[in-house]
Image (spheres, rainbow, N blue to C red):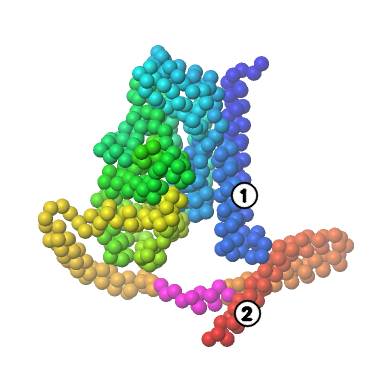
Amino acid sequence: MACPSLLVAIRRGLRALRIWRAVLTLIIFVWWDARQWTYPGGCTSERRQARQTIRARWLTTELLQLGSAFIKLGQLLSARPDVLPVQWVSELADLQDKVPAFSFEQAQILLEQELGDRCAEIIDLDDQPLAAASLAQVHRASLRSGRQVVLKIQRPRLERLFRLDLQIMQQVAAVLQRHPKWGRGRDWVAIAQECRRVLLRELDFRVEAQYAARFRQQFLDDSRIRVPAVVWELSTRRVLCLDYLPGIKVNDREALLKAGIDPSAVAELGAASYLQQLVRFGFFHADPHPGNLAVAPDGALIYYDFGMMGLLSDSLRRRLGSMIRAAAARDAATLVEELQAAGLIAYGIDVGPVRRLVRVMFQDALTPPFSANVIEKLSGDLYELVYGQPFRLPVELIFVMRALSTFEGVGRSLDSGFSLMAIAKPYLLPLMTSSGSGPNDLLNELGRQVGAIGSRAAALPRRLDESLERLEQGDLQLQIRMGESDRQLRRMISVQKALGQSVLLGSLGIAAALLGASSRPIWAVLPLVAALPVGFGWFRLQIKLGRESRMDHVSSQSR
């Protein structure tokens, strides 16, 4: 009979093999998708996006099969559009950790281990869970005092599996970091360490209890918002006890109408409560999907699940008013400066593309009449901008955009005329019209602008001197973008490549003829086999050049 330590080692080895198999498969997919010749009919942006969507769905399925730690990892990576393509971020953002429930007997054993004699306070525990997720499942219960509660019970042996998976994640991150291409511009080791810290903290339900209590405190004076209270004496590291607050699912329009509740009022209340979290408190629910929101019989909004909460930094909150004023004035340059000052965009990079994108946002998304999915458009543009670029985009900001987009979608499902921008106006207007405190705001603003102009004027001679010095040394670069010249240059490169391939094909043909005439004609197969991929590439280049020639002919006729 094998010793227990040997069995544990075998299980750890098999688990590592399963994870590395998924990682290697993903690497092969990435390598394959980067090759243009793998796209039948030519590589276009539409075909790339379609294949990226397929890969993202495959990755989501793999994470679900790998279990709890990787489901949470996928949810965290969905907040990193700077390291993943847009299609992957969108697919992982919908990753819901609904997994089969564990047995009621295991739940009872864990309750006895965690609560001890305090289990006597629980007189009625439902054997069927209300919900089951990757970390825990929730059971309804009654206490001796008559209080109706829910118990969030952590899955058995979860922490041991978590630590093993996180250790393997660190190894994968180290391998990616050493890769000359994938490791450039990304700190995979730091990302893995941050994921480890966040995931291990989420295993401690005492942290979630503190989050729930703080969130409840914010809305004590608002009867329209309800947050379940924590039962501290029955909450431990692996058990969380909260008040039971039943309600109708927030996006169930038919059930709301049947209960006599106005769906449009619910949509407005949800958006207003979230804006209040952002503008007034800076502490917000980071995962407000419809499963975590419900409506009480009297129309009040109920929040559930406080494992993922966000906190806006003080610097970002201090500069929020300046950002909103710059956006209202359509001042792209000032908005980019404020984003840099708040730490959202790194210094020392080319901010020209950022300013151009901001101007497009002003024109497309922030110009009345506002479209129904304005937040979705803004987040899509933002994800396109930051992928692969040196921007320090905080995870909290992604959570904010995603939550606002969720409320936007829920609002549209409840009320076709729902407008998030109209609801946001009363909350943003004070930030747009004030820049300080007290009666001297206008004088303070004028003084700030005069100081800014003075500092720029004082720095002007130095900047001119630096530019002249760079010009004398030959370091001054002038960047000119000309669409026609770029197109002609790409065509010249294609022609040169086709010429090189033609020469190589001719050489291989001569080699095959010489080997065929030798004493061992079988060797003539080798250059012919080598000529197949070269000939395929040459044929594709000819089609591409022919298509470009026809386009040039059509454009010249139109001129």
Residue at 71% x, 62% y: name it.
533
Residue at 39% x, 73% y: name it.
478
Q: Is residue 486 magenta?
A: yes
**Most distant residue in the right direction:** 519
Q: In the rendered view, would you say 388 is above or below 153? A: below
* Magenta-colored span: 479-491
**Image check: 496 left or right of 329?**
right
Amino acid type at mark 1: Ile
**Image check: 536 left or right of 69?**
right
Residue at 49% x, 50% y: name it.
89
The x, y position of residue 268, in whole percent, is 35, 49
Q: Main secondary structure of the magenta part?
A: helix
Amino acid type at mark 2: Arg
Q: Quadrant of residue 419?
A: bottom left
Q: Is residue 498 magenta?
A: no
Q: Which residue is under mark 2? A: 550
Disc 1 to disc 2, how far (Cα)? 36 Å
Q: Nearer the viewer, residue 468 or 416?
A: 416
The x, y position of residue 398, in whole percent, is 40, 49
The disc at residue 393 is none
Q: Which residue is under mark 1? A: 28
